[in-house]
Amino acid sequence: MSFFQEKFVIRSWFLVLTCAFATVSMAAEAPSSPAAATAPAAVSKGQMLVGADGGRLGPVSRISADGSPQIILDGKLITVPVATLSMANGKLTTSLTKSQVLALP
């Protein structure tokens, strides 16, 4: 093989390896579906609401017009924003802690 043919072969292999590494890197960065899946929350009356720390806040007493659950916590009727809700491991969960829920208007 001549000098130019060897150089061409080396460059070809370098290009092949570069493409292979780029493909592997892109596959590693591809988003995957979450394993412990959180889903949109379907709120129903009587369903237990769980706080961000995993503690039980109380059962849903009412559901407001926008779908936000209302619970009675420490003798106070509190509307928990629907945007903070998810279904995690089969439980209606809010991303708020108990103290944050108590601070809601």
Image (spheres, rainbow, N blue to C red):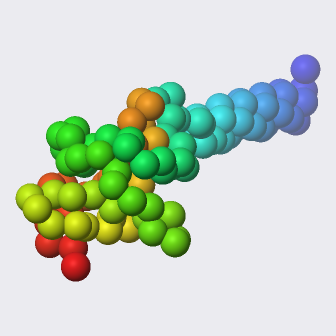
Residue in the foreground of this view, choosing between 68 and 85? 68
Q: Residue at x 22, y 79 (%)?
A: 105
Q: Residue at x 20, y 48 (%)?
A: 57
Give left or right: position of 88 versus 16. left
Residue in the foreground of this view, choosing between 99 and 14? 99
Q: Picture quarter containing residue 54? A: top left
Q: Position of residue 44 (x, y in %)?
A: 48, 47
Query: In this rendering, is residue 70 above or below 48?
Result: below
Residue occupying the far top of the picture:
1
Query: In this rendering, is residue 18 above or below 51?
Result: above
Query: In this rendering, is residue 39 above or below 7?
Result: below
Q: Residue at x 16, y 57 (%)?
A: 73
Residue in the foreground of this view, choosing between 30 and 90? 90
Give left or right: position of 7 versus 44. right
Number of labels in the image equals 0
Q: Position of residue 16 (x, y in %)?
A: 78, 31
Give left or right: position of 24 versus 80. right
- The quarter of the picture where the N terminus appears is top right
Residue 21 visible at all: no
Residue in the foreground of this view, choosing between 98 and 31? 98
Residue 91 visible at all: yes
Q: Residue at x 32, y 41 (%)?
A: 48
Q: Position of residue 104 (x, y in %)?
A: 21, 73
Q: Position of residue 46 (x, y in %)?
A: 37, 43
Query: In this rendering, is residue 103 above or below 2?
Result: below
Q: Picture quarter containing residue 26? A: top right
